[in-house]
Amino acid sequence: MSSNVTICETSADVLALVKKFRMRKEKNIAAIVLKIDKPTLTIVLDEEHEDITIEDLQDELPAQQPRYIILSYVQKHDDGRTSFPLMFIYVTPQGCNPEQQMMYAGSKLEAVKNLGLTKVIELRSLEDLTEETVLDKLKLFK
């Protein structure tokens, strides 16, 4: 018999921030970067980015630490429509501390559920966080 174990809770501030982020009116790419506060075992805000490119976001992320990213993306469709999908991206770069990796991996599903997100992408390298990767992954969610 197995049960779901929650390693880290999502902070109330993050839940409120993501709720507000869903309703944003801006028509640009934006991101919320989340990290785990180890002493409290809580998912907290690391950084917020407004009007950022995917490449600039990649440069802002730590090279040796996992992160969760809530990305509001601008997707232009072939038929002329524009949509603004909201995605949860879990990045685990090579060389991360194994304990950190386990904390993030063990908390991901609960975080996704608590934040109410359905488009989930996992990346094993910061170099994989590209415009092309995001577009390719979005095709899977149609």
Image (cartoon, grey):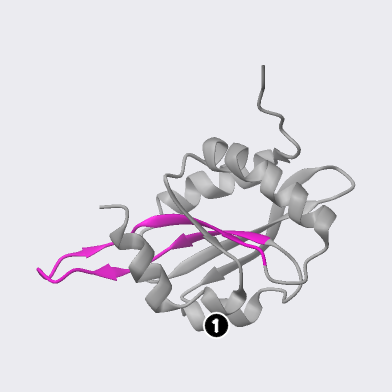
In the rendered image, which quarter contains the N terminus? top right
Taking 14 as reference, is 27 above or below it?
A: below
Left or right of 81 in this view: 87 = right
| 42 part of magenta stretch | no
* Image quadrant assignment for residue 41: top right
Secondary structure category for the residue under label 1: helix
Q: Residue at x 76, y 49 (%)?
A: 102
Left or right of 116 in this view: 100 = right
Return the residue at label 1.
Answer: 56
* Image quadrant assignment for residue 137: bottom left
Between 27 and 106, the residue placed more toward the observer is 106
Write the start and end of the magenta stretch as one range.
67-92
Q: Residue at x 68, y 49 (%)?
A: 105
Question: x, y (%) of residue 11?
Answer: 70, 41
Question: x, y (%) of residue 115?
Answer: 53, 41
Between 36 and 135, the residue placed more toward the observer is 135
* Image quadrant assignment for residue 73: bottom left
10 Å crowding of disc 1: few (<14), some (14-19), many (20+): few
Q: Residue at x 62, y 45 (%)?
A: 108
